[in-house]
Amino acid sequence: MPERFTHRFRATELATRGGIAAVMSRLRGLQLPERVAGDVELALAEAVNNVTEHAYCGQGEGTITVTGRLEDARLVLRVSDHGIPMPDHKLPEPKQIDLSVETADLPEGGFGWGLIHALTSSVRYDRRAQRNTLSMVFALAPKVEDSQPAP
């Protein structure tokens, strides 16, 4: 039987830090594999910070809800809010960023969606009934190449 949980917190900088920590604590309590926990925490932080900075920008204070379902071989996290929708009601494409430039010439932002796409098995955005929902799926079973011994 899948393990499920829901956690709600205000969309403020301080509350989001506490909300992310609470979700990660809950996941570790459900035996989330440590090799996956860092990826989940990073993707969750990117998603939640995007909600705080963009969905509720100029909207006043809002609430973020994170629901999770831990199943046999995957973790499904949903981050939802009542903020403004994504442009064109769809996920932004990950930006191609040239990392070969000098550190001072790197952009300050633009890495988030690329990270979320790279760290998840799948990611989806929906807008229904004035509610944004970002669904992220993380594989819990090791990839075949991860389980092979190094030559």
Image (spheres, rainbow, N blue to C red):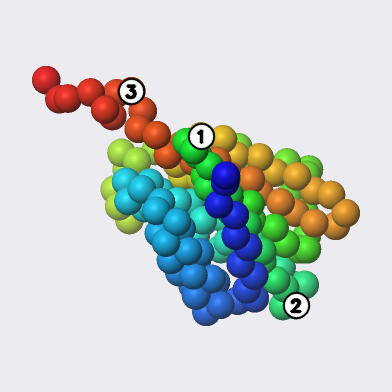
Asked whether the residues under the numbered discs 1 and 2 touch, taking CB atoms below 8 Å apart as contact, a structural biologist would say no
Discs 2/3, front? 3
Discs 1/2, front? 1
Asked whether the residues under the numbered discs 3 and 1 touch, taking CB atoms below 8 Å apart as contact, a structural biologist would say no
User: Is tag 2's residue or tag 3's residue first in the polypeptide sequence?
Assistant: 2
In this orientation, which residue lies closer to the viewer: 151 or 82? 151
Secondary structure type for disc 1 = loop
Q: What's the amino acid at mark 3?
A: Val
Q: Mark 2 points at which residue?
A: 60
- How many C-alpha atoms fall within 10 Å of the one at disc 2: few (<14), some, or many (≥20)? few
> Which residue is farthest left?
151
Secondary structure type for disc 2 = loop
> Which residue is farthest right?
129
Q: What's the amino acid at mark 1?
A: Ser
Give the answer, above or below, for where 11 lies relative to 139. below
Q: What's the amino acid at mark 2?
A: Gly
The spot of residue 124 in percent (x, y) is 66, 40
**Position of 11 compared to 19: left or right?**
right
- How many C-alpha atoms fall within 10 Å of the one at disc 3: few (<14), some, or many (≥20)? few
User: Is tag 3's residue or tag 1's residue first in the polypeptide sequence?
Assistant: 1
Q: Mark 3 points at which residue?
A: 144
Q: What is the quadrant of residue 100 in the picture?
A: top left
- How many C-alpha atoms fall within 10 Å of the one at disc 1: few (<14), some, or many (≥20)? some
Secondary structure type for disc 3 = helix
Q: Name the residue under label 1.
A: 121
Give the answer, above or below, for where 86 lies relative to 146. below
Q: Give how far apart the Cα atoms at labels 3 and 1 are.
A: 14 Å
Q: What is the quadrant of residue 50 in the picture?
A: bottom right
Give the answer, above or below, for where 18 lies relative to 125. below
Asked whether the residues under the numbered discs 2 and 3 touch, taking CB atoms below 8 Å apart as contact, a structural biologist would say no
